[in-house]
Image (cartoon, rainbow, N blue to C red):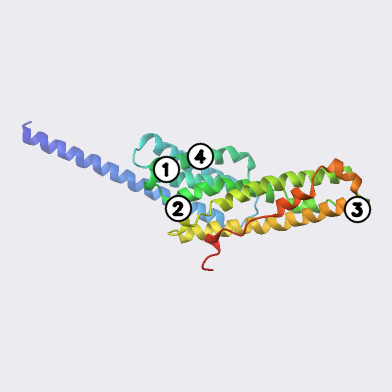
Amino acid sequence: MNRRLIHVAMAMGFILLAGCATVKDVQRSSDLIRTDNELARLLQDVRPEKEVSYAADVTNLAIHAKGEADALVKNSRGKERDAIAYYRIAATAYWKNGDSGDANQLFEVADRGRALCVQLEDRAPDRDCLYLQLVIPLAAFEEEAWRTNLNGLLNEVNLYDDGLSPEEIQTMKKIHTSLARAKRLLDGIFDIGDKGRFETHAGMKAYYCGNAGRAKDYYSPVAGVFETKLIEIYHEFPGATTDLDITRESAAELRKLPELTPVCTEGN
């Protein structure tokens, strides 16, 4: 084979390799879009929260997205943005599948995605990276507040039946501990609301403000009722306050929350 034929053969080889890479990229992009669309379909599908098939479908989607992200990180340099998108999908699916046992998986995929965001610096996809910052505090708040059923626990403390029982004292302590954790998470969610992060992302701004607002709307009434009941206990059952070991000042502090972050109120 003369030199010209060698050059032609090498050129054809590069063209074929480039073609394979392009096909693979297209296939990956198509899978990423399909996976994202399937997540949206599942989350919009109205089914009972604990339906087994729904949880299984969401979990399988999370496993697939995590596997694709891990493979991209390991085998495909320059595909970090796609990996971040897959990690975002996996984190959402692990959050929404209703299984608190998947918390470690949620933390793992969110942490891996955020690490890639830091690595890419100004080349990182803003929307996905903002979401990966939000998903853990939002999921943790939901687990702490909503699934702990603080309203239900408050209803168990009835000060006008047979007085204040030891069980009710323990319930008040449990609510106090849970509210303190929830408030720390809510403060963290509010801290993320830096206006500059959302200026060019109206969709993310709406998502953030909607979730932050719902979290505050849930927390504030519960903290208010808790403080009211604690004041009543101090007034009606002063002898029980030693066992209760919760000060009125701490309850008042739990009730204090800043106004919803300006990014969610300016221009409204």
Quarter where residue 101 is shown: top right
- Disc 2 and disc 1 in contact, CB within 8 angstroms: no
Distance CA(mark 4)–CA(mark 3): 49 Å
How many other residues sit within 10 Å of disc 1, few (<14), some (14-19) or many (≥20)?
many
The amino acid pointed to by label 1 is: Ala
- Disc 3 and disc 2 in contact, CB within 8 angstroms: no
- Residue 171 lies, in percent from the top left, at 81, 45
SS class, disc 1? helix
List the residue tagged with mark 1. Answer: 83
Quarter where residue 4 is shown: top left
Distance CA(mark 3)–CA(mark 2): 52 Å
SS class, disc 2? helix
The label nearer to you, 3 versus 2, is 3
List the residue tagged with mark 3. Answer: 236
How many other residues sit within 10 Å of disc 3, few (<14), some (14-19) or many (≥20)?
some
Residue at screen point 60% across, 40% down: 103
List the residue tagged with mark 4. Answer: 111
- Disc 4 and disc 2 in contact, CB within 8 angstroms: no
User: 235 or 118, which is in the foreground?
Assistant: 235
List the residue tagged with mark 2. Answer: 127
The amino acid pointed to by label 4 is: Asp
Taking the image as shown, residue 119 lies to the left or right of residue 255, namely left
Of pointers 3 and 1, the one earlier in the residue sequence: 1
Q: Give the mark count.
A: 4
Distance CA(mark 2)–CA(mark 1): 14 Å
Residue 138 shows in this picture: no
The amino acid pointed to by label 3 is: Glu
Q: Assign the C terminus to one quadrant of the image.
A: bottom right
SS class, disc 3? helix
- Disc 4 and disc 3 in contact, CB within 8 angstroms: no
- Residue 26 lies, in percent from the top left, at 33, 48
